[in-house]
């Protein structure tokens, strides 16, 4: 149902579909069995607004489009479909995530028997803060980006908010949002706020309160439930919230338990809606890359190419680039995290660009390397064709022996790179030992070749890379070769060359490997044709 109909029906009770899956690295068999055997869900929770209040919210949305603190399908129909709360995700899915999180935590605690962490309570309370606004100087803000975990559970895009979740003895999951209150003066300067009055119907939580009630409500919930307290203090962006939680921990004599493991376990495995968002953000970046490569030429600045990829992604409705891009010409490409992006592109240079965009809160991450002139030199071609073949080999290994985890992909890459370097004469023919060849591969590619991808570029960073690859995962495959100018044991014609090829992979519901960035050109001959195609046309920077 669309946003308006949902708001009008919210007074009626609606059930939440239970999802009992627990991540592979959270003791899956025991946790899943416990979660499956648990009783009632939170469908009995009631909204704190009446039917009349809900109808008034729908009326506000109709009559005052854009009056909330974030886009809706009414104010931004070009970005959000009628049945979505945020791009690509419906409200029901967000509610299911909250339910699943608390059921997973409860199941995990129960797996230890009658007591967990020295306490016998079956209640659990989790508190999570939004991001806060940050400033370059004075009153000049950086672009606001919501805390990924908070967005994952709420869909709320406002700063300084707080989510409280608890599961009680009857296994009902209760959710509360604490929001900045409506303030005409502040909204005159900084834009509309949703306010707690509209948070219940918009975000599907059980209750909502002004932020200044946070301490009182936390204290009351803790006193009533005597719950285990879950709060990630180190990652919190809100000092007042940290103070409240430390005070509560001291008063209740309960430690603050980290919740990030459970959240990352859920975020690791993408839902069908998330898979579609990943396809979209990767397609935006891939097609933007193709245009930038086609339009690039010697005499441009790395900075111009930075501007071009940013512009083209935004013109396809991306919010912004997902991270500061690497745009490295010539020997700059041998610096793995080069982000100065200020040098001029010379005729014989290779250009290495590592960039991605964010769409609907989900990120892409692509690297391509191409000849500025439209044609590889012989040494460049030798290395590029070798790396292109290596990446194809590694992608073909995914979910097979040597590619069942990200760590295995890395080990396989290092060994095969060593073998390929040996074949082209950059590594001694006398080496035959697996470790020696893998060591030579690591020497020329001293970074991991895969990381998880999702709402963040280096997504779910606490999930071990020795976790078995399963459907729902998204990750990169990005072998590279970097030969510094000072590599005296390498023939001079290969020195100063850096190449990386990176694609984003999804393991879909059927267990098939889907290269999300496959439309982005990387075949060496196709790449030369693409880069030569527009060489006779002036670049945009030349028209200024």
Image (tube, helix red, strand yellow):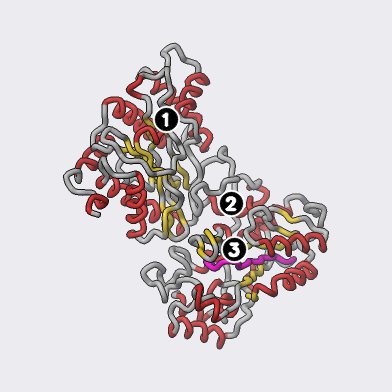
The residue wearing badge 1 is: 482
Question: Which mark is first along the chain, 1 or 2?
Answer: 2
The residue wearing badge 3 is: 130
Determine the CA span between mark 2 and mark 3: 17 Å
Image quarter of residue 41: bottom right
Seen at 74% across and 56% down, the residue is 256
Nearer to us in this view, 140 or 11: 140
Circles 2 and 3, Cβ within 8 Å, touching? The answer is: no
Q: Nearer the viewer, mark 2 or mark 3?
A: 3
| Magenta extent | 156-169
The residue wearing badge 2 is: 264
Question: Which mark is first along the chain, 3 or 2?
Answer: 3
Circles 2 and 1, Cβ within 8 Å, touching? The answer is: no
Seen at 38% across and 56% down, the residue is 280
> Which residue sits furthest top?
430
Determine the CA span between mark 3 and mark 1: 40 Å
Seen at 40% across and 47% down, the residue is 355
> Would residue 415 be seen by someone viewing this image from the given angle?
yes
Image quarter of residue 530: top left
Relative height, residue 98 to residue 456 (above, below): below
């Amino acid at each position: 149902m669309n946003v308006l109909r949902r708001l009008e029906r919210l007074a009626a009770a609606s059930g939440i579909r239970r999802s009992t899956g627990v991540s592979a690295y959270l003791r899956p068999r025991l946790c899943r069995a416990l979660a499956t055997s648990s009783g009632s869900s939170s469908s009995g929770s009631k909204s704190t607004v009446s039917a009349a209040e809900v109808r008034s919210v729908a009326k506000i949305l109709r009559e005052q489009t854009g009056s909330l603190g974030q886009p809706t399908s009414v104010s931004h129909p070009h970005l959000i479909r009628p049945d979505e709360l945020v791009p690509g995700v419906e409200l029901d899915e967000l509610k299911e995530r909250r339910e699943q999180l608390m059921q997973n935590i409860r199941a995990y605690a129960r797996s230890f028997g009658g007591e967990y962490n020295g306490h016998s309570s079956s209640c659990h309370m989790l508190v999570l803060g939004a991001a806060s606004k940050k400033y370059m100087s004075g009153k000049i803000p950086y672009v606001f980006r919501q805390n990924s975990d908070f967005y994952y559970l709420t869909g709320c895009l406002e700063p300084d908010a707080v989510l409280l979740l608890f599961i009680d003895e009857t296994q009902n999951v209760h959710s509360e949002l604490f929001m900045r209150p409506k303030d005409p003066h502040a909204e005159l300067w900084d834009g509309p706020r949703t306010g707690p009055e509209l948070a219940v119907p918009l975000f599907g939580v059980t209750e909502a309160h002004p932020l200044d009630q946070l301490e009182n409500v936390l204290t009351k919930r803790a006193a009533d439930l005597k719950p285990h307290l879950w709060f990630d203090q180190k990652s919190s962006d809100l000092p007042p919230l940290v103070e409240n939680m430390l005070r509560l921990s001291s008063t209740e004599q309960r430690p603050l338990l980290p919740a990030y493991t459970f959240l990352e376990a859920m975020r690791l495995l993408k839902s069908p809606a998330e898979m579609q968002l990943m396809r979209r953000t990767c397609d935006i970046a891939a097609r933007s890359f193709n245009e930038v490569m086609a339009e690039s030429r010697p005499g441009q600045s790395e900075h111009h190419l930075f501007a071009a990829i940013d512009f083209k992604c935004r013109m396809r409705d991306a919010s912004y680039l997902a991270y500061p891009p690497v745009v490295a010409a010539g020997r700059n490409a041998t610096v793995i995290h080069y982000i100065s992006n200020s040098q001029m592109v010379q005729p014989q240079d290779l250009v290495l660009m590592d960039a991605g965009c964010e769409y609907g809160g989900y990120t892409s991450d692509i690297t391509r390397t191409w000849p500025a002139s439209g044609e590889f030199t012989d040494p460049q071609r030798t290395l590029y064709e070798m790396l292109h073949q290596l990446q194809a080999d590694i992608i073909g290994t995914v979910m097979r022996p040597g590619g069942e985890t990200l760590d295995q992909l890395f080990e396989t890459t290092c060994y095969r790179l060593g073998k390929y370097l040996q074949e082209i004469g950059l590594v001694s023919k006398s080496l035959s030992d697996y470790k020696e060849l893998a060591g030579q591969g690591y020497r020329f590619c001293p970074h991991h070749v895969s990381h998880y991808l999702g709402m963040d570029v280096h997504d779910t960073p606490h999930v071990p890379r020795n976790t078995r690859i399963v459907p729902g995962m998204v990750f990169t495959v990005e072998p590279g070769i970097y030969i510094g100018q000072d590599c005296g044991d390498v023939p001079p014609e290969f020195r100063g060359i850096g190449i990386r090829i990176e694609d984003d992979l999804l393991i879909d519901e059927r267990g098939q490997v889907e290269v999300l960035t496959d439309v982005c050109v990387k075949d060496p001959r196709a790449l030369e044709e693409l880069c030569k195609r527009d060489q006779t046309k002036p670049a945009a920077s030349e028209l200024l």
